[in-house]
Image (cartoon, rainbow, N blue to C red):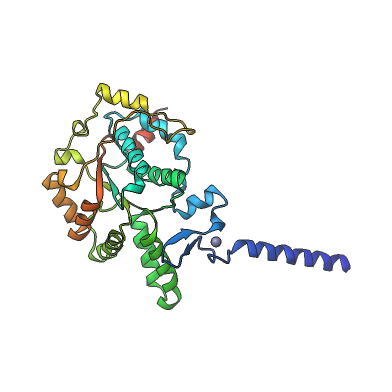
Amino acid sequence: MDNLGALESLLKSNMNKYAKKKVCEKCKGTGFIIREDNSVDYCDCILSSKDSLLKAMNIPKRYWKIADSMDAFYAEDQDGSYTNAYIAVLDYVNKFKENEGRGLIFMGPPGVGKTYLSIFSLLYLEEKYKIRGLFYDVRSLILDLKSLIGKDRHLNSSSYEKLLTKVLKAPILVLDDLGSEILTDYNKDILTYIIASRYNDMAPIIITTNFNLLQYDIRPEQVGLSSSPSNKKQRSEIQISSKNMFEKNGPEQGKVFSYDDLPNSLKSDLVLRLGESIASRLGETCDFIYMFGEDRRINKSKKTKES
Ligand SMILES: [Zn+2]
């Protein structure tokens, strides 16, 4: 009986330890805290491992080991626009602190690496300055917000507000796949609120959006790199390996475009998809990065089938 009692108390104390470990007192298990000045930061409890940090930044698991697959993208960069976009990201991060809230918009057809590079920007900012941003696919963000507001308001208003605060106050926010379809009025309202609030706070946003630029008569030559000798030179100047993936030699800058540079037909389609108030704010605060090429996800599955 004594042995059994000892075992029981041992089990109980272990269970208590486990329970204490499971829910963090500081953040109540949410992984982030809201400071007195209303800014948000990740709680110490999730910073103990890289995996939990990436999870809290909402980065999909597929992209956690991004450094290991960087080479594959370069090998398939036919027109140089991926290399250009990559260099533009390095420039952006290196000047992040002087940027004063400026953001980026990756614009191009599906499967050319827009999401990839937007996440790479987050990882690089984390690596370089310990700035911990937040990733959200636009559709999931809207669903998550709706699911929290749709239930018992009283019970869930705090989780709704927490998610919204996190999105509004993250030091940098990626909105993946914005405006691939025309937004409904309700979704437009949510997104306008988020984008306008961040605009007022001068908090940067990185956007990816699907546009087939060729349809607007924008061609790879306009990025200025298309299979030219300087493109090859630039590529050789970037050292890619998981150890020094963030290093860039050489003075060349990635080519980015301003809202004023966009053809009128593209501007009016942006307004049509996103609404005037989102398009104008993003146009004012973001640089546009043009991307071209074939859908690498489809190519990849083709190759797998052939081999
Ligand atoms: Zn915590």
Query: Residue 39 appears at what percent x and percent y?
Result: 41, 62
Query: Looking at the figure, which quarter contains the N terminus?
Result: bottom right
Q: Is residue 65 visible?
A: yes
Left or right, 101 with respect to 7, comes to left
Q: Residue at x 34, y 40 (%)?
A: 89
Q: Residue furthest left?
A: 264
Q: Residue at x 41, y 30 (%)?
A: 71
Query: Looking at the figure, which quarter contains the C terminus?
Result: top left
Left or right, 270 with respect to 131, comes to left
Query: Residue 171 appears at what percent x and percent y?
Result: 39, 55
- In the image, 199 versus 154, the foreground residue is 199
Q: Residue furthest front?
A: 98
Q: Residue furthest top?
A: 229
How many discs mark residues in the rendered view?
A: 0
Q: Residue furthest bottom?
A: 154
Question: Ligand 1, what quadrant?
Answer: bottom right
Q: Residue at x 47, y 47 (%)?
A: 61
Left or right, 176 with respect to 32, comes to left
Query: Residue 290 appears at what percent x and percent y?
Result: 24, 39
Compared to 49, does 89 lie above or below?
above
Residue 145 placement: quadrant: bottom left
- In the image, 258 versus 289, the foreground residue is 258
Q: Residue at x 63, y 61 (%)?
A: 21
